[in-house]
Amino acid sequence: GAGVSQSPSNKVTEKGKDVELRCDPISGHTALYWYRQSLGQGLEFLIYFQGNSAPDKSGLPSDRFSAERTGGSVSTLTIQRTQQEDSAVYLCASSLGGRVKDGYTFGSGTRLTVV
Amino acid sequence: SQKIEQNSEALNIQEGKTATLTCNYTNYSPAYLQWYRQDPGRGPVFLLLIRENEKEKRKERLKVTFDTTLKQSLFHITASQPADSATYLCALDKLGNNDMRFGAGTRLTVKP
């Protein structure tokens, strides 16, 4: 596609429910990244994919968080048993071949609110 | 511990002046440093990258410097315009990986 697409754009969920966030990267971009941004804060790294494998998942905050990528394209970030502190904007980015010199292209994010 | 610090949460300047934003880091040895612009409700947009062996990089009204001894990058916007008002984020690569770590950003407001 022309840009990085994330869905849903907004999600309100009850505490304890599971949520799935989707990221559709730019076609041909082999590297995909998930970040989290809380209100007024910087971007917190969650996980990085190169193809379908995740060389760096060090940023996942707990075992309630998981992510997968299939076919070297779409990625899903799953949060189980959501807590109020999970409320944030979840941003996905992709880059060509994982080369940082090209910069990242970000989606507009999914705003998650846990009530 | 590893830290990326941007000089201030907010910077207000008058239109036409040069805005200078600072990014300092500790316990990183980045090969690359990037700057992004983020508008409210949107994802960050890539602006510039500078490599560790480059001292300065320019793009139109933007200039970035990178001092690996001071562990600091400066981001300048010359002849600033109200449309430059946004949050600016610096990011640098974690050694050995291709993924970037971001600072908290500086919110720039350019007043007419």
Image (cartoon, coloured by chain):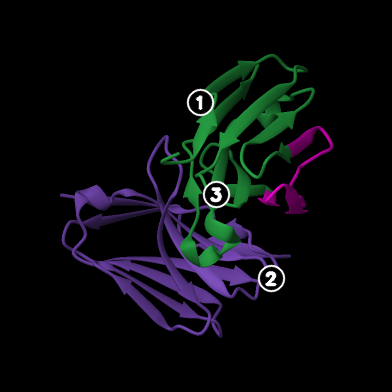
Chain colours: A green, B purple
Whether residue B102 is situated above or below residue A87 in the rendered picture: below
Tell me the quadrant of the picture where the N terminus of chain A can be found. Answer: top left
- Dot 3 crowding, Cα within 10 Å, few <14, some 14–19, many 20+: many
- Dot 2 crowding, Cα within 10 Å, few <14, some 14–19, many 20+: few
Residue B42 falls left or right of residue A87: left
Q: The residue tagged with tag 3: helix, strand or loop? A: strand
Q: Which residue is mark 1?
A: A9
Q: Which mark is residue A94?
A: 3
Whether residue B44 is situated above or below residue B93 in the rendered picture: above
Which residue is located at x 53 percent, y 50 percent?
Answer: A28
Q: Earlier in the sequence, mark 1 or mark 3?
A: 1
Disc 1 marks a residue whose amino acid type is Ser
Q: Could you say which is closer to the camera, residue A81 or residue B96? A: B96
Which numbered mark, 3 or 2, is in the foreground of this view? 3
Magenta stretch: give its range. Answer: A48-67
Residue A101 visible in the snapshot? yes
Q: The residue tagged with tag 1: helix, strand or loop? A: loop
Tell me the quadrant of the picture where the C terminus of chain A can be found. Answer: top right
Q: Which mark is residue B95?
A: 2
